[in-house]
Image (cartoon, grey):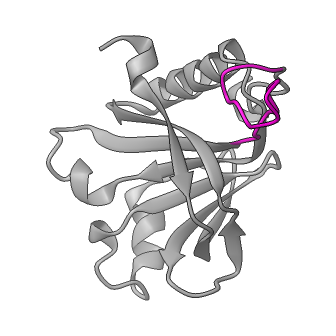
Amino acid sequence: MTQSNQYHIKRRNTTYFAHWIEMDIRTKLNAKLLAEHTKRIPNLFEMDIHYIYDGSNIITLCLETQESGNFSLPEGNYLSRQSLIHEEDELERVIEQFYDYAAAQSYVTVGPLILIEKSYLSLFSNDKLYYELQVLVEPIANSDGGNDHECGRMTIGTPPFLT
């Protein structure tokens, strides 16, 4: 698969989330931490877990809800990449590649980095976790007065937790 085939623009409607766990960016997520918080969430391993990184030192783990929760992502076009990850170090590399690709395409990213752990799909991937990265990309006006995501300027950087 070529690099450009790994990336897609996805249209998302407004999405609502309920906060589940907030943790310091340096905290390693482990089974004990998850077990302490799973009692109030039935069928957790059938749900996608959304890690929201907003540039602060806190990562928020959220679960999608159908009604207004305590956090929402706006409707819009999101740059997306799906990856199977064996170790956490690989995830950092994939995130760096994700932002490098966005820069190379001159996408202007807006808002938090969303890392979605596809829990159900991960059950079928031997010793690997299935992740999807997403970030909102700002529409850029083209010469016809419309919007074009393939041209324009770029204002993104690598998230601080990767440096």
Give me the residue at 82% from left, 24% from top.
143
Query: Magenta includes 148?
Result: yes
Give the quadrant of residue 149.
top right
* Nearer to us in this view, 58 or 6: 6
Residue placed most toward the observer, 61 or 79: 79
**Left or right: where does residue 110 sit relative to residue 66?**
right
The quadrant in which the N terminus is found is top left
Q: Which residues are magenta?
A: 137-152
Q: Is residue 156 magenta?
A: no
Q: Is residue 114 left or right of residue 90?
A: right
Q: Position of residue 128 (x, y in %)?
A: 26, 37
Q: Position of residue 69 (x, y in %)?
A: 64, 83
Left or right side of 33 for 106: right
Count up the numbered dots.
0
The quadrant where residue 20 appears: bottom right
Q: Residue at x 59, y 74 (%)?
A: 17
Q: Residue at x 33, y 85 (%)?
A: 42
The correct choice, above or below, for 146 with respect to 106 in the image is: below
Name the dominant secondary structure of the magenta segment: loop
Residue that appears at 38% across and 21% down: 5
Q: Return the x and y of residue 52 as percentages of the image width and height.
A: 64, 55
Q: Position of residue 76 (x, y in %)?
A: 65, 54
Q: Is residue 120 left or right of residue 38?
A: left
Q: Which quadrant of the structure image shows residue 2?
A: top left
The C terminus appears in which quarter of the rendering?
Answer: top right
